[in-house]
Image: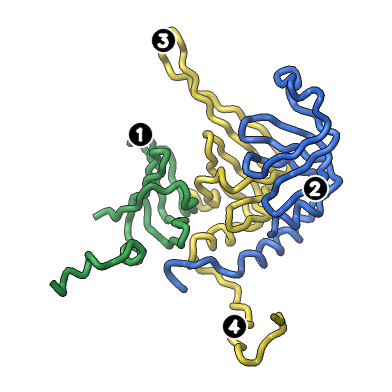
Amino acid sequence: MSTAASPAAPAATTNPPVQSSVEEPLDLVRLSLDENIYVKLRGDRELRGKLHAFDQHLNMVLGDVEENVTHVDLNPETQEEIVRTTSRKVDMLFVRGDGVILVSPPAKAV
Amino acid sequence: MLFYSFFKTLVGQAVTVELKNDLSVTGTLVSVDQFLNIKLDNIRVDNESENPHMMSVKNCFIRGSVVRYVHLPPAAIDTALLQDAARREIQPSTAAVRGA
Amino acid sequence: MADVAPAKKSPSDFLNTILGCRVVVKLNSGIVYKGVLACLDGYMNIALEQTEEYANGQLKNKYGDAFIRGNNVLYISRIE
């Protein structure tokens, strides 16, 4: 099948103008390219970083990333929950999409 | 296919693959496939004392599905090119409930 | 019998009727999100606006916009 523009279907071959509205959920992520985003991951992990790339699985490449991991330990004597977060920085990170729960542009966060 | 192509451009680079079981493996990227399975050479494991079973392993194949992160060498990545590729990749829209 | 229309509607018809409404989204992990349903797709990926995140019934976070990956979704329900 030729990829050249077919005169029979001109409408289908013209790219739509740059779309700024959100018509499907992934548009929200597309509009966040080159922006700092917040990502919530499985295993009580959170990332903040600049979104350089993503695909439909939510695989992503993030730059200047800060990762926060939340650990909950139980004090064996008092049964108190001890919540502790560890933080680290990564210059450039590929994130596998299957661990993603939520993506949000933090600049717009309340 | 975006990230498959992307990882192919990184063959030969040193990367750290962090697995979902918290094992981190650093090595030279040898090859990658469409599932983002990864082959690494000359590997080294972070916290080798905690993972003595890895001491004699020199190269490995990592199933894509067990990967959590891949730490990348920033110098090897053209972020502008990557963002353009991502915009192009997402154009063919997945079936939206509304707006189809 | 002809006016029992709701019974014939498919799940995606239901989802279309609640676009733009305030909804509650519960995830498999038990975390609950409340917000305005901006849109969703065939994977049940969801875009929410004015999102509030609740864990154990307590408000934990707020997001202006939020994308929720569909595989985590247990249910979506309209808030009256």
Q: Nearer the viewer, mark 4 or mark 2?
A: 2
The residue beneath circle 3 is A78
Identified by mark 1, the residue type is Asn
Q: Are marks 2 and 3 in contact (CB under 8 Å)?
A: no
Chain with green colouring = C
Image position of A11 with respect to B75: above or below: below
Between the residue at mark 2 and the residue at mark 3, the CA separation in whole angstroms equals 51 Å
The hue used for chain A is: yellow
Q: Report in which chain the residue with disc 2 lies.
A: B
Q: Quadrant of the N terminus of chain C?
A: bottom left
Q: Residue at x 34, y 50 (%)?
A: C24
Q: Which residue is drawn at 24% across and 55% down?
A: C80
Q: Is residue A110 visible?
A: no
Residue C36 drawn at (x, y percent):
37, 57
Q: Report in which chain the residue with disc 4 lies.
A: A
Evaluate whether label 1 is on the same chain as label 4. Answer: no
Between the residue at mark 4 and the residue at mark 2, the CA separation in whole angstroms equals 37 Å
Identified by mark 4, the residue type is Ala
Callout 3 secondary element: loop
The residue beneath circle 2 is B31
The residue beneath circle 1 is C56
The residue beneath circle 4 is A12
Q: Residues within 10 Å of mark 4 (few under 14, many from 20)?
A: few
In the rendered image, the residue lying farthest to the top is A77
Identified by mark 2, the residue type is Ser
Callout 4 secondary element: helix
Chain with blue colouring = B
Between the residue at mark 1 and the residue at mark 3, the CA separation in whole angstroms equals 22 Å
